Image (tube, rainbow, N blue to C red):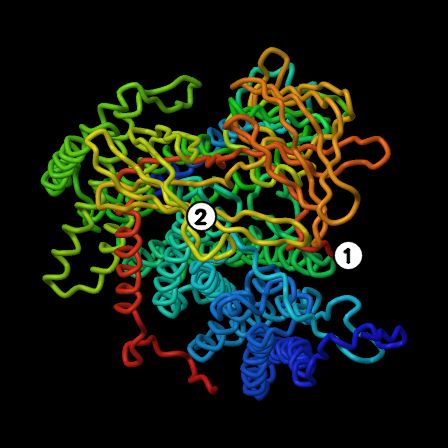
Amino acid sequence: MEHNHNEDPFANIPRAEAWSLVVGQAGSIAVYVALAFLVLSGILYLISGKVPKAEKFATISFVIGSISIFVPFGCLLALFIKDQFQYEYVFSHGDSLTELKYKIAGVWTAQEGSFLLWACATSLFGLLTIGGSGLYRRTYGTVFALILSALCGILAYESPFDLLKDVVQKGEVLMPPRGNGMTPSLQNYWVVIHPPTIFLGFGALTIFFAYAVGALVHKNAKDWITYCRPWSLATLAILGLGLSMGGLWAYETQGWGGFWAWDPVENVSLVPWLLMATLIHGIIVQNVRGRWAASNLIMGGLPFLSFVYGTFLTRSGLLDKVSVHSFASMDRNALGILRGFLIFLVVGFIALCIWRAKSVAKETVKPIDPENGISRENSYRFGMMVLSMLGLVIAVGMSWPVIAALRGGQGARVEEWLYHQVVVWFFIPLMLLMGAAPFVSWREMGAKALFGRIANVLSLSIGLTGFTFIGLMDGPFGVRSHAESTVRNPMGGTWPLIPVLGLLMFLCWFVAVTGAWRAIELAKKWKMSVGGFVSHLGFAVLIGGLILSRGMEKKQQSFVQSGSPASALDYVVSFKKLEGKDLFDRDSKAVFEFKDPAGRTFDATPGLYYYEQGEELKTQVWPFVKSSPTHDVYVALFPPVTDVWDMPKTFKPKEKRTVDQITVEYLEPTSNGTTGVGAKFGAKMRITTRTGTFDVEPQMQVTEGGIQPLLTPVGTEFFAVLGRMDAATRAVDLKLMFQKPLYPLEVFYKPMTSLVWIGTGILTIGGLMSAFARRRRHSKAPAPLSPVEV
Amino acid sequence: MSMKLGPLISGVVAATALSAVVIAFTTGASPYVTIQQAKASTGDRLHLAGDIVKSTVQNDVYTQTLTFQVIDSNGDRIKVKHKGEKPANLSEATKVVAVGKIENGEFQSSELIVKCPSKYEAEKK
């Protein structure tokens, strides 16, 4: 075929269709439109105190601005679904061959998209709540509009609508046919459902911040808690669900056999959850007793501020060394906006609290005498203190690398064992309170009266703890097998594991039994607070599952080769086969047989497939989990080892060298046949391995498709493969491969992981039940000073 | 005055707890160390960050032990020995954080955290 060199080199590459460029433009422009309307809305709300007419326009522009934020989201979604790879973001995270659900999830797999998701969730809650913000509406609107404007500002710089470099040629936009695709390790159903859930929770945090500021500005610390109570319950439930989903995601895909790693990114979402839980309990006290209004005002702002702080911390690159989540460094201007935004919010909020909180709170006190003995109020105070302190401690822990670096040196990292050691001192009083406080009345009561009320629950809990341990006593992984296990204690020594687990299990039972007991009592009376106790029950079940599955975990590493079974924990593991269309099939599995001492077997089928990244062949592995109600057997497969050496090694003729305990002597080069197709080149070698010395002649053959290496067995263990021969010096690149690939496995035995799933479910249902029970009924809503026009 | 008793106790407990936590973090957090500091330390969860010397990477196929040299920010070198699962992306990694302790002048690593130049997260200006 004649080749015309004057032809356009890009002739065969498709052009981007006009609509796609319009959509991208629309997405970019909509961010600025949203920004303009939101800034305008903020200003109008601000002046509407003096100019009442402005309020109507403020609300209109708030609604337009908020809706505009969904436009870039929709545009980006369309570009992903229609494979418009001329856009850098779509190119980097999308691929035409992936399933639709991953194209959709592509929108939020990276930094720009997650900010967009945050902005959309925030504006959704803005739209839902602005109309009901009653007498706080001016400040509420101002604050909400300001926060959304800042997010738009960040999005303006962190735009997902930039075209790929060099894609514009001679005024035309080329469209690459394929994209990079989402990182394979993310391609799992959780990437579709976890981020939207947790960001919905993050977006809702703005509500409480804006109300708290509104309450301070309007000098009314009373009504805001009624306005935001149902939202706070729903937010806690959604955030909790999002957190649990994140843990389950890690468990199912990461291969380290756990739910929670105290990674900074995980902590960033846990801290607002803890602070929200504190706020909710504070709201209860203020509702019943009219007290603690000042601390509630502060607690209202903290969940949102802690989230903005955490976002800044993880995105700023300050934690690069410690997080498993890697983030692209943010656009400098966008990071600047985030930093300025954080400082402004924190300083402004603190100043406002100092100025107003105390005096505003005075108005709310109901004429009831405070008590000093054991009363529900005092229990709540202590519980809330412990909860918020726990949030603070975790925030300090996740900032520790930065704090330690500021103190000199290269910094330090708080690891899992240290978190556990510190957290447990807050966990114990917290659980005792969750178990006991629901039986304490608001009136002061003596220790004796209280004990009388909780004696049944206490003895039931102790009994159930005993039964738990008897149930888990025997078997190769039971309590007995942990007789020697220890945990670190704060004095630098160790404690035996089982008594520590016994105490923790008792606490979980105590909270669970109390929760169930009170929930049943209240359900009989059709009380609204049932949901709260259902949540407590769910929390105890979830935490119990986390503690047992981690505390009594056993793990062992093992290397399995076809034909040579290995032992792991109590199982004999043998490799059976690879299953799947081909090695590139995403559904390919490696099948291993697990046999226990009684001879019972099951097949473990961890996922294993290959993909190409640039020139390189990469391996993707997925763990396999065999679940049962009592325990999980968790099998993490690591990429099979086929190459003995990472890189081929070069040998010159007559050279003798030992590499990784294998001695190679290159005796002489050989050739067979003339040049041209069919000719063979080889190298006579003497290779000494653990199993013996072998004289071999690995060869390469010239074929029509190029030079092909021939696999030459070295004993029964390895293949020798020639990579390249230097024509002048006759030096060769030698590669040694295992004849049977080595499968590295890590096998975990984890008791009672089913509780993690069950607990998550109960916790979420309980939270949503409370939110539903406390929803604002229009007839009962506190009368706003004036009706709100929307 | 009795009215203030509850908050007072809470305040004292909170302050004590927070100081205890700060002390625990100060003494317990696993430090990032240079090779010089590592050699002087008896900690068993030291975090040693540095560049991998590619040519020194050796993998003992029989015992699944990985050894390589690391150069830290001061330019010092040390041999790191890691037994067990090899990080999948070690061959592309240039920087590594080895977690472990000093034994016989070598760094015994129990965990390797590798940093790879990822193509998925492109650098921005």
Q: Position of residue A478 (x, y in %)?
A: 23, 29
Q: Residue furthest front?
A: A673
Local secondary structure at mark 1: loop
Q: Position of residue A136 (x, y in %)?
A: 48, 73
As drawn, A16 above or below A701: below
For discs 1 and 2, the disc positioned in front in the rendered view = 2
Local secondary structure at mark 2: strand
Chain under label 2?
A
Kind of residue at disc 1: Lys
Q: In 3D space, how far apart are the residues under numbered discs 1 and 2 (Cα atoms)?
A: 35 Å
Q: Can residue A357 be seen here?
A: no
Q: Residue furthest right?
A: A6
Tell me the quarter of the picture where residue A713 sits.
top right
Q: Residue furthest top?
A: B104
Number of labelled discs? 2
The residue under the point 55% across, 67% down is A97
Kind of residue at disc 2: Trp
**Residue placed most toward the observer, A379 or A561:** A561
**Residue that carries the numbered disc 2 in the rendered image:** A622
Residue B125's label in the rendered image is 1
Residue A269's label in the rendered image is none
As drawn, A127 above or below A449: below
Q: Can residue A714 be seen here?
A: yes
**Residue placed most toward the observer, A421 or A89:** A89
Instruction: Sort mark 2 into few (<14), some (14-19) or many (20+) by Cα contacts within 10 Å.
Output: many
**Residue placed most toward the observer, A752 or A29:** A752
Instruction: Sort mark 1 into few (<14), some (14-19) or many (20+) by Cα contacts within 10 Å.
Output: few
